[in-house]
Amino acid sequence: FVKSGKLTYSQSLTMSEQEVDNCCWVAEASMWTNWVHHGTAQAASEIRLMELHVNGFVDIVRKYTGPLRSAAKYAGLFVETLNRVPEQELSDIGEETTALDLAMAAFHEDLPLGLGVGRRA
């Protein structure tokens, strides 16, 4: 995850470039599926990244049924979304809005009441 600064990402097939800032994730797909990177990223300024250690994440989530179920649902939704992207448009960069939409769909049931997502009956 980009914490601060900017990256320039070049997608391999189209040779298109995009600026990546703190509204984007880098290589999230590698967390949820067998992933082959589709481009390269290079720092465009001084940058701070946050790395999530997948094995530690899995070890923690496995201990709790609700979050494990939600993480599995998120992974399934993520892969379904990814499968709808034409191959030439696949990217290592994820947009915040897509991740938030998927998270709301996957984790809604596990959120405490009063977080603006509605009340459960």
Image (cartoon, helix red, strand yellow):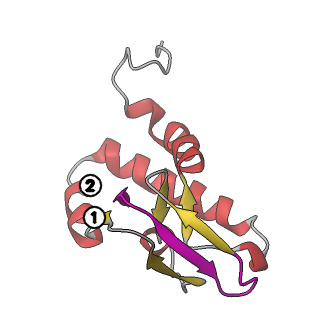
**Disc 1 crowd, CA 10 A, few/some/many (<14, 14-19, 20+):** few
Q: Position of residue 81 (x, y in %)?
A: 67, 59
- Does 112 appear above or below 25? above
Residue identified by numbered label 2: 61
Distance between the alpha carbons at the discs numbered 1 and 2: 5 Å
**Residue in the picture at 56% in, 75% down:** 9
Q: Secondary structure at mark 2?
A: helix
Q: Tell me, for residue 84, which label it has, or none.
A: none
Q: Secondary structure at mark 1?
A: helix
Q: Position of residue 88 (x, y in %)?
A: 77, 79
**Residue in the picture at 20% in, 66% down:** 56
Q: Nearer the viewer, residue 58 or 47?
A: 47
Q: Nearer the viewer, residue 92 or 49?
A: 49
Q: Position of residue 98 (x, y in %)?
A: 60, 49
The magenta region covers: 1-16
User: Residue 72 falls in which quadrant of the image?
Assistant: bottom left
**Disc 2 crowd, CA 10 A, few/some/many (<14, 14-19, 20+):** some
Residue type at numbered disc 2 = Val
**Residue in the picture at 42% in, 46% down:** 70
Residue identified by numbered label 1: 58
Q: Is residue 26 left or right of residue 94?
A: left
- Does 53 appear above or below 1? below
Q: Is residue 60 left or right of residue 35?
A: left
User: Residue 82 falls in which quadrant of the image?
Assistant: bottom right
The answer to if 11 sits in the magenta stretch is yes
Q: Is residue 25 left or right of residue 56?
A: right
Residue type at numbered disc 1 = Val
Mark 1 vs 2: CB contact within 8 A: yes
Instruction: Check the picture and name the quadrant holding the N terminus.
Output: bottom left
- Does 58 appear above or below 16? above
